[in-house]
Each structure stands twice: as C-alpha cells, then as structure tokens.
Image (cartoon, rainbow, N blue to C red):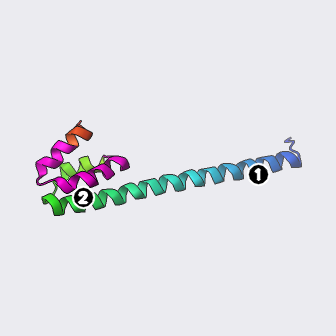
Amino acid sequence: MEFTTSWMREGIKVGLKQGEERGLKKGKKLGLEQGKRQEAQALILRLLNRQIGAVSVRLQGRVKALSLAQLEKLGEALLEFSNKNDLIVWLEKIHPPS
C-alpha cells in the first residue's frame, strides 16, 4: 500500500516542474551557444574562401573544431591573410593538429 499525503504529491509536482524548467533553460542556453558557433563557423569559412580561395575539407574541419572565442579571433586575423599558408600557420599556433 502506497502512502502519500497531499503535501507530498504537491512537493513532487513542484519538484518536477522546477526540474523541467531548469532542463529547458539549460537546453535553450546550449542551443543558443551551438547556433552562435555554427553561424560563426559558416561566416568564417565564407570569408576565408573570399580572402584566400577555396579551403580544403581538412582545413574546414580544423576551423570547425575551434571554440567560439577562437573563431572570433580568426575572423579578425583572416583580414591579414594572403594565402592558405597564413591560415595553416595561424591554426597551428591556436589549435595544433592532433
């Protein structure tokens, strides 16, 4: 026989609601961060293609592995790139190949 009082049921209900709200808030935050990073990746890759020509799939992968902060730094640095080697040198300083 299960024994729960109305205050226990109410406590469970409130706890579940709070947990759901926290989960939604965390999910929203993670989704926004992921969206910002994906948009930054896309923008940086477009800018690199204009600045230094087509970027290989391998280099695109290295760019996509960067954090949002690193992508922002690359966005500033790429304005001074004149060729693909400049990108490679920059990536090796910031994010050495595995």
Q: Can residue 64 be found in the magenta stretch?
A: no
Residue visible at 87% across and 47% down? 7
| Image position of 23 (left or right of 11) | left
Determine the secondary structure under disc 1: helix
Residue pointed to by mark 1: 13
Say which amino acid is labelled 1: Lys
Q: Are marks 1 and 2 in contact (CB under 8 Å)?
A: no
Q: Main secondary structure of the magenta part?
A: helix
Q: Residue at label 2?
A: 45
Instruction: Specify the label residue 62 is tagged with.
Output: none
Circle nearer the N terminus (1, 2): 1
Point out the image quarter for the C terminus: top left
Give how far across and how far down residue 48 sits, in percent.
Answer: 20, 58
User: Which amino acid, by three-letter code, is at mark 2?
Assistant: Leu
Q: Is residue 11 left or right of residue 44?
A: right
Range of residues picked out in magenta: 66-90
Residue at (38% x, 54% y) in the render = 37
